[in-house]
Image: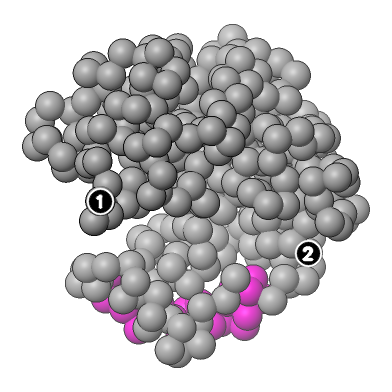
């Protein structure tokens, strides 16, 4: 497939592809984009980590998957890790944005995302005000016996980077409640200048990792480092919580499915239908079947069996309960 031509009313898509599970997720994501939005006019960059001192092995994708991604119009972006690597693979998304060769509107998506509608419609959204996914829970900071509290913890970070703090707060939420504070899931991130955004995200994440404020001494930064630095970077570029023009993400346009068992257990029928449809063509099937989770869940029908265990209208209130049931019945495959 020929590469789409960038127009003034489009944006570029960025994701990570690397050896192991992520390359298969990336393949499924791009296949779903081409199926659901064949008119998408932006460039699709697949950032591929390269061998180097921060990796013990070769993190590159297989040649077959790389060739299929290129056939679907992707640009493979060699990613030479400088700050992160095997010790913190979440950092690949940060360094991918920093390494992007072009400026302009961008949307980063985690590789475990499915396109379920015409993504091009997001071109009308306000990319000049950076934002990210609100499909998150209060994972960080964690309440500890001797910790200083949410306000003190977050304010220490804003002060560290000389950012104004009060305007980041959601005053409709009570003081010391996690949703009062700017916090995102890094499953999707949007803005206008990927290299500048990524460079600041990288530099600030490294600064927090290597010299954290004392208010964070009790807090774990793995795997949360990217999501700790992200709201600071978004706020520094004049961004904030997404408005209604971003409602299609984590909605009608995308699904951040994360684990196949969770996708089958809790996502809408539409998501499962798209997933199985885009995985069906022989050229995609022969590649996805090389990963055990994809082979067993999609092609051997175990996903449908897992789905039958749950009522989407009455799901367990906690994800952990869903996970435990999937594990108990042998449907937790990654």
Foreground pick, 190 / 120: 190
Residue drawn at the location 16% of the way across and 42% of the way down: 177
Place residue 217 in its image quadrant.
top left
Q: Residues within 10 Å of mark 1 (few under 14, many from 20)?
A: few
**Residue 146 disc label:** 1
| Residue 302 in view | yes
Q: Is residue 137 left or right of residue 25?
A: left
| Residue beneath the point at 51% across and 78% down | 332
The colour scheme used here is one colour
Q: Position of residue 317 (x, y in %)?
A: 22, 68
Q: Which residue is mark 2?
A: 287
Q: Is residue 197 above or below residue 287?
A: above
Q: Could you tell me residue 159's position as x and y percent?
A: 36, 19
The quadrant of the rendering that contains the N terminus is top right
226 displayed left or right of 171: right
- Magenta stretch, main secondary structure class: helix
Please give the label number shown on residue 240: none
| Residue 120 in view | no
In front here: 255 or 148?
A: 148
Label 1's element?
Answer: loop
Q: Residue 39 magenta-drawn?
A: no
Residue 307 drawn in magenta: yes
The percent coordinates of residue 24 (x first, y second) are 70, 58
**Which residue is farthest bottom?**
329
Q: The residue tagged with tag 2: helix, strand or loop?
A: helix
For image coordinates 40% across by 36% down, the residue present is 214
Q: Position of residue 65 (x, y in %)?
A: 82, 54
User: Which residues, given as a range, are shown in magenta?
Assistant: 293-312
Q: Quadrant of residue 196?
A: top right
Disc 2 and disc 1: Cα gap in Å? 50 Å
């Amino acid at each position: 497939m020929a590469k789409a031509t960038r127009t003034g009313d489009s944006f570029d898509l960025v994701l990570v592809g690397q050896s192991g599970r992520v390359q298969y997720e990336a393949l499924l994501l791009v296949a779903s984009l081409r199926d659901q939005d064949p008119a998408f006019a932006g460039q699709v960059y697949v950032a591929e980590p390269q061998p180097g001192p921060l990796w013990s092995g070769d993190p590159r994708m297989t040649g077959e998957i790389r060739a299929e991604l290129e056939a679907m119009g992707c640009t493979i972006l060699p990613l030479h890790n400088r700050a992160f690597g095997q010790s913190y693979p979440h950092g690949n998304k940060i360094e991918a944005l920093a390494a992007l060769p072009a400026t302009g509107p961008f949307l980063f998506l985690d590789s475990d995302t499915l396109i379920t509608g015409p993504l091009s419609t997001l071109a009308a959204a306000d990319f000049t005000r950076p934002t990210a996914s609100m499909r998150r829970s209060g994972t960080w900071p964690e309440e500890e016996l001797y910790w200083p509290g949410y306000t003190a913890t977050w304010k220490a970070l804003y002060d560290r980077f000389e950012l104004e703090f009060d305007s980041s707060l959601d005053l409709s939420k009570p003081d010391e409640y996690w949703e009062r504070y700017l916090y995102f899931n890094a499953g999707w991130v949007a803005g206008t200048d990927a290299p500048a955004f990524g460079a600041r995200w990288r530099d600030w994440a490294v600064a927090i990792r290597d010299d954290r404020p004392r208010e964070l001494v009790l807090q774990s930064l793995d795997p949360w480092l990217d999501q700790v630095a992200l709201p600071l970077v978004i706020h520094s570029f004049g961004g904030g919580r997404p408005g209604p023009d971003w409602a299609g993400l984590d909605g009608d346009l995308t699904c951040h499915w994360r684990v196949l068992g969770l996708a089958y257990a809790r996502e809408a029928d539409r998501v499962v239908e798209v997933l199985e449809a885009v995985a069906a063509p022989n050229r995609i099937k022969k590649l996805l079947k090389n990963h055990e989770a994809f082979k067993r869940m999609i092609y051997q029908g175990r996903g449908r069996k897992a789905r039958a265990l749950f009522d989407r209208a009455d799901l367990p209130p906690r994800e952990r309960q869903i996970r435990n049931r999937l594990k108990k019945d042998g449907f937790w495959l990654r």
